[in-house]
Image (cartoon, rainbow, N blue to C red):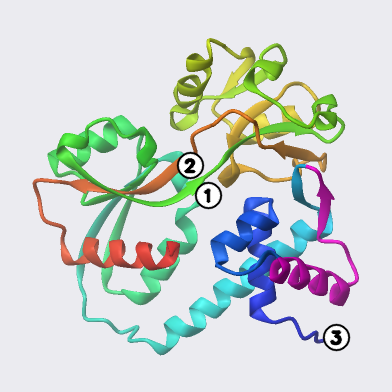
Amino acid sequence: MMRDLSLRKLRYVMAVAKSGRVIQAAVDLNVSQSSITTGVKEVEEQLGVALFRRTSRGMILTREGNRFLQRVNYAFQALNDAFDSLEDTHSTLKGTLRLAMTYTVAGYFMPPLLAQFQRRYPWVRVELHEVPRPDIEQGLKAGDFDLATILTSNIEHYQWLETLTLTQSKRRLWVNGQHELLKQEHITLRDIAHYPYIMLTVDEADQSAMKYWKPEGLTPNILFRTSSVEAVRSMVANGTGITLLSDMVYRPWSLDGKRIEHIELSNPIPPMELGLSWPRHRPLSPAAKAFRELAQSYSA
């Protein structure tokens, strides 16, 4: 049955799901909090299901909400594709784009952006490389890559690199659905320091974590180190430990269907920043410029 769900209301749902808070969604979309609250409620009433669970910590997607949001994201992607199809898809831009990326970018950010670029510029040959951040920086300097999508918050050699941050992703505490920490109103790093901690190591996540643990004079009680996001997700969901990771890699359910909650800590935890980087001493090729422009509009 067709339902009259406006794109505006669906954007409200997406914004609340992204931030977990009505007030932040209102700021992000430059509308009133009442508009967000009313819009989300109307969508839920029309669907006949609760998309969010309201808690003192914010708005948490339900299982039905998570499924609905996935389909809404597909719908918006299809809409973008429809607009792209009306543009000049037979662009005369040719050449090669040597594009490097790190693991997190490749898995959680790049696929829809890359697909849109390939549709818009079908005559550009794209060479893709998944490379650790230090090798990307050296490769950009040496001319092995034209452009990189990278965690800009991890970059070291700013002296020879230009950077453009496209998006930020909050880091929050992950716990399983029955964890005792869910009963606490305010949680700090000190409150969680003694809990078994699952440390993600890929994309220097462990090094980034210590940048906000050490200033507090604390170290996490590391039970297990792993380069697998799915391993972290599964261990947290099953109650083996807790972790602090960005919203970009957060999913409310593990592969075996167990609930994962995320909690914003009282400490000022720096967000993960993701964007583009290219060599300062060498001008971008036309293909690289086209990708940069698309990435900027995609993340706006």
Mark 2 and mark 1: Cα distance apart in space: 6 Å
Mark 3 and mark 1: Cα distance apart in space: 32 Å
**Magenta extent:** 34-56
Tag 3 residue:
1
Q: Principal SS element in the magenta part? A: helix
Q: Which amino acid, mark 2?
A: Thr
Figure disc tally: 3
| Residue 257 percent location from the top left of the image | 82, 43
Q: Which is more N-terminal, label 1 or label 3?
A: 3
| Residue 154 percent location from the top left of the image | 37, 33
Q: Label 2 neighbourhood size at 10 Å, few (<14), some (14-19), many (20+)?
A: some
Tag 1 residue:
108
- Label pair 2/1, CB-CB below 8 angstroms: yes
Name the mark on residue 104. 2
Q: Residue furthest bottom?
A: 86
**Closest to the observer: 234 or 278?**
278
Mark 3 and mark 2: Cα distance apart in space: 38 Å
